[in-house]
Amino acid sequence: MKIKTKLVLGVGLLFAMIVLLVVVSSVYINMLSSDTKNILIANYNSIDYSRQMLNALTNGMENRDAQDLFRENLEKQKKNNTEVGEKEMTDKIESDFHRVIAEPNDIALNKLIQKDITDVMLLNMQAIRLKSDVAERTANDAIGWVSITGTVCFIIAFILLVNLPSNIANPIKELTESIRQIAAKNYSQRVHFEHHNEFGQLARSFNSMAEKLEEYSNSNLAKLMMEKQRIETLINNMREPVIGLDERQTILFMNDDALKIAGLSKEFVIGKRIGDIAANNDLIRSFSEDLVLNENAGEKMKSLPVKIFADNKESYFEKEVIPIRILPTGEREERLIGNVIRLQNITPYKELDFAKNHFIATVSHELKTPISAIRMSLQLLENKQVGALNGEQKNLLESIKDDTERLLKITSELLNMTQVENGTIQISVVPCEATEIVEYAINATKLAADHKQIKIQTKLQNSLPRVLADVEKTAWVLTNLLSNAIRYSYEGASIAIDVKAEENSVKFSVTDNGQGISPQYVGKIFDRFFRVPGTRGEGTGLGLSISKEFVEVQGGRIDVKSELGIGSTFSFELGSLRTDNS
């Protein structure tokens, strides 16, 4: 419970007890006042009136003044009849008074009226005694309840007096002692009380401060300077450009290799914000943009390779932005204290990759000539004019023909792959009819489909817009998808080709009812050289990768949906003439 709440409750409770005590006292005082007022008004006045009438009788009723005095007090008594039977007695006094006036010297009549007045006095004296008893009981009740209420108030006040000051004073005392220990450089001192109030928050803040002071005290400035020098030497001797920044993107260090490729001097960059230098340096500007992206991503990030003129040649570097986060002592949340930009020189790998692609392209190109010659020789051997072949020779000829076709397909795919990687692929996007592309793919795969007795069904939407595509590359993609569907479908199955217009594109889909693809392999199906483990069928694992490149280089996208044991649907979208007109 918070201290403020405790104080409010304590003081409020005392205030409530005081109010209760005042209310109880006021109630009983009013009751006593009412009882005594009743005695004074109702009974004492009747006795006084009776005494005045007796005095008038004593003076003699033949006296005119005595008669007026008696009559005056009799009238007052008639208005003050409060007890049972008092009115009848007053009426009798009045009756006797008239008789006495008529015969003032009648002694018996005087004694009778004196007796009547004495009876009224006696009646009121008895009433006074009874009402005194009631007032006494009221006083006793008042004393009892006021005593009980006062005792309860005293007990509560005593409990608050004992506990409340100690609840406030003890934590302050402990905290004061801990502060004295900290002042005496005893930084291991901690406040050990744990409360969910202001003192608890103060204790946590104090302990956090003490931990930081202890950490700072245990550190050695000379040791820190030595470690700083060691780290700077290590960074400067790294063979990769490295730049360090604080949380405000101020440059803390920039090793010699980074300065060299950026064409800057250390005096010009250290201590300055990277944004100020980016205004006049393209390379630093790209680093600044990566920092913005990394801040949004909130984690370690690599960007596309950047080409920089270094070591007297065009070099390629891979940028990596590494955020530096620490958990401050005594705190629970990590805090970003800066970033490190690291450049990795990948020029040797690029050169090897280029050499690989050049070698593959050269070998593939050189292989196409002898393979074409072999295929021509096979066609000649199949010609009956050259000579008849027996059954075994025909089987061998078919086997050689299949291997030749496979080699020719592999070399074509390798050439396509090298063109994609080298960026030398030639794309000619023109408006064309989707039906032409579909017919080309069906004709190219007709023999393979007939061989497995597979039926190809086409569904072309009416009024299809013209497709903006490279006819040759797009036909190659659809043919490849259709060939794969035939290869992995069962004999006698059917394959559906669906072409329909989307909002600003035309979508080609090839659906088969084959074995499907396991979910863990769907995301890798377009990777280069990837083939689903355990699949029967021949291929290089390049067809789908090249198809993806061909589609994306035309501004489209390719996708696959598959369920194991049910089948797969490969689809790709290309822009339509509507997009061009819009």
Image: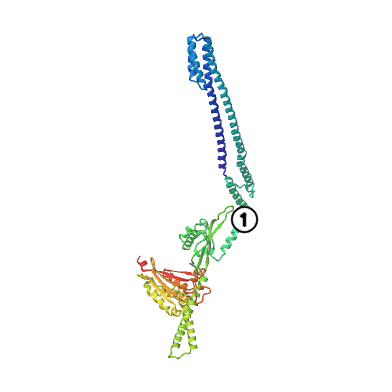
Q: How is the image coloured?
A: rainbow
Query: Image height check: is 503 above or below 31?
Result: below
Displayed quadrant of residue 500: bottom left
Displayed quadrant of residue 163: top right
Between 136 and 522, the one nearer to me in the picture: 136
**Mark 1 is on which residue type?**
Ala
Residue 244 in view in this figure: no
| Residue at the (55%, 38%) spot, across then down | 12
Residue 171 in view in this figure: yes
Horizontal arrangement in the rendering, residue 400 relative to residue 130 (left or right): left
What is the x, y in percent for residue 226?
Answer: 61, 58
What is the x, y in percent for residue 158?
Answer: 62, 36
Query: Image height check: is 300 above or below 90?
Result: below
Horizontal arrangement in the rendering, residue 77 relative to residue 507 (left or right): right
Q: Quadrant of the C terminus?
A: bottom left
The total number of labels drawn is 1
Residue extending farthest to the front is 108
Between 463 and 250, the one nearer to me in the picture: 463
Query: Image height check: is 254 above or below 99?
Result: below
Horizontal arrangement in the rendering, residue 186 relative to residue 86 (left or right): right
The residue labelled by disc 1 is: 222
Q: Quadrant of the N terminus?
A: top right
Report crowding for label 1: few under 14, some 14 to 19, many 20 or more residues within 10 A (C-alpha): few
Label 1 sits on a secondary structure element that is helix
Between 55 and 357, the one nearer to me in the picture: 55
What is the x, y in percent for residue 318?
Answer: 51, 66
What is the x, y in percent for residue 136?
Answer: 58, 26
